[in-house]
Amino acid sequence: MGKKNKPEKLKIPSVKTSIEDRLRKYRNNRVSIFFLFWFVFSVFALSIVLIFGLSQYFITEKAYKSEASHLVRQSGDIVKEKVENGPPEVYGKNFSFYLITLEENYDVNICILDDNGKVKYPLPPADVDINDPEIQKTLDFSKEIVKLKKELKKQGEVATYEGNGEYVYGTTLTIYGTEPVYLYVEKSLELAETAMNKMGVQLTLMSIFAAVLSFAVSSAVSGWLVRPITEMTEKAKLLAQGDFNVDFHGDGKYAEETTELAETLNYARDEISKADRMQKELIANVSHDFKTPLTMIKAYASMIIEISGDVPEKRNKHAQVIVDEADRLTSLVNDVLDISKMTSGIETLKAEKVDLSKSVKEILERFAYLKEMKGYKFEADIDDGLFAVVDELKIGQALYNLIGNAVNYTGEDKTVYVSLKKESETTFRFTVRDTGKGIKPEELGEIWDRYYRSKESHKRPVQGTGLGLSIVKAVLQRHQLPFGADSEVGKGSVFYVVFPIAK
Ligand code: ADP
């Protein structure tokens, strides 16, 4: 028994999964707009808070210190004055009390130190045990005296400097003939510290507030920006699946740029939907147009085989139909090829300086038979000697198609107006006008598209494959020439091309 060969299942990825696959690649290694906003806002807000807060902090601290040093100097000077020149009764028992009064009045600490930094005044109250090591410590200024002596050496008679959490004023004194002692005045910086601590707390609170605020603001702003984009992405996925009814404008108000993006996507949607429709129509029309001549060819060939083969007159007539239909097929194939070559850019233009006045007259000559046989009138207004650098053959075909259409669609008077006129120093314009039914404004944009045909059928004196204007468009676009059509329903249409004058 041989193995059964299971036919392999064909895997066709759906549009949706292939989009998701593509998106997955980017999802993890990209920064989201929300994060970006949050980060930038937070850094911005915090740096502003910090810059302002810290500068405030330092400015205040500096101002306070300079004020404190000023005050300690001032009160120090007064204390020195009062200690040196106090009334005689204060010296002696009452001296400590006198110093304490001064301390209270000037909000400072005052000590009189001996050369070793021992506190001489104010003496501790009588009930305090001087031998208690704690008390001993408060009476020992030996470290401070070293510093004070150093500063006095540097600064002269009086020294002020920042100590450990206080401002110090120091000087030497001689009280009533005693040996020199040191006056040591301290002004505490405690107030500054509490103020600074308060500011620090404030700064922290402000930073937290800024962080919360920037989080809120960035969520709001990025939400407002991102929501439309997310919505558009979802809609674009629907579009990719072939839903041409999506509207990229959302319900809410978008920012200007987002609105423009939505409008551009709507435009893209319209274009894609148009291209999709055109493609379907093209296939339908081309197959239809191929089928008709093929059916005819087959029918007439059968007729020759079965009926007219032996009757030369009939046979020739039938054979002629076959030849004509084959010709139609050929020109259809040629037109399709022309357009695809032109639009894909395979074919290069053979650009040269061409006398278009002469070319247009020659093209009109090719329609001369319609004058004699079908009573058409051509009103031509052609300036002489208008040259442009173009591919003569291709431009000739485009202008021929435009005039041919005017003949096909002109009105009862069977008149076609052709003009070639200088328009400015650098340009001249070709126009062809008919007096026919005209083209509806909504159709004006579509007639240039491959295989567009107005709904109504039309008798044409000039054979067309329905690809005439597509060829015109392809040729003129390749030449980068401005062209277009204006039309008024009931009055007729004007098709024009603008050429740059060749020197
Ligand atoms: P065809 O004329 O063979 O159908 P074309 O590409 O030349 O193909 O034209 C496309 C369509 O544009 C025509 O079917 C017709 O509806 C419209 N059209 C072109 N020229 C004119 C015109 N001069 N007046 C009115 N309609 C026109």
Image (cartoon, rainbow, N blue to C red):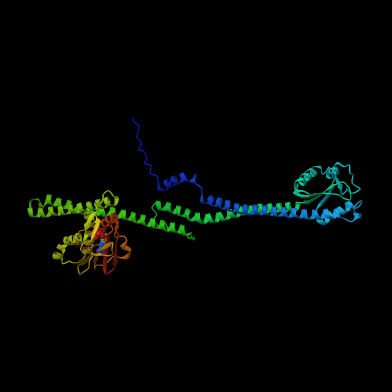
Q: Which of the image's four quarters has the N terminus?
A: top left
Q: Does residue 397 lie above or below 378 as drawn?
A: above
Camera-nearest residue between 273 and 31: 31
| Residue 230, percent from left and from top | 48, 53
Q: Residue at x 53, y 56 (%)?
A: 221
What is the x, y in percent for residue 477?
A: 29, 56
Where residue 60 appears, x then y in whole percent? 69, 54
Residue 291: % across, % down: 22, 53
Is 197 on the left or on the right of 364, as rendered? right
Q: Count the marks: how many?
A: 0
Q: In this orientation, does residue 319 appear?
A: yes
Identify whether 8 is placed above or below 201. Answer: above
What residue appears at the point 31 percent right and 63 percent down from the top-left corner?
Answer: 444
Classify the position of the C terminus by image quarter. bottom left
Does residue 455 show up? no
Question: In the displayed structure, does residue 239 sit left or right of residue 61?
Answer: left
Indicate which quadrant contains ligand 1. bottom left
Of the pair 168 and 295, the residue shown nearer to us: 168
Whether residue 9 is situated above or below residue 40 in the rendered picture: above
Left or right: 148 in relation to 224: right
Relative to the observer, which residue lies in front, 213 or 118?
Answer: 118
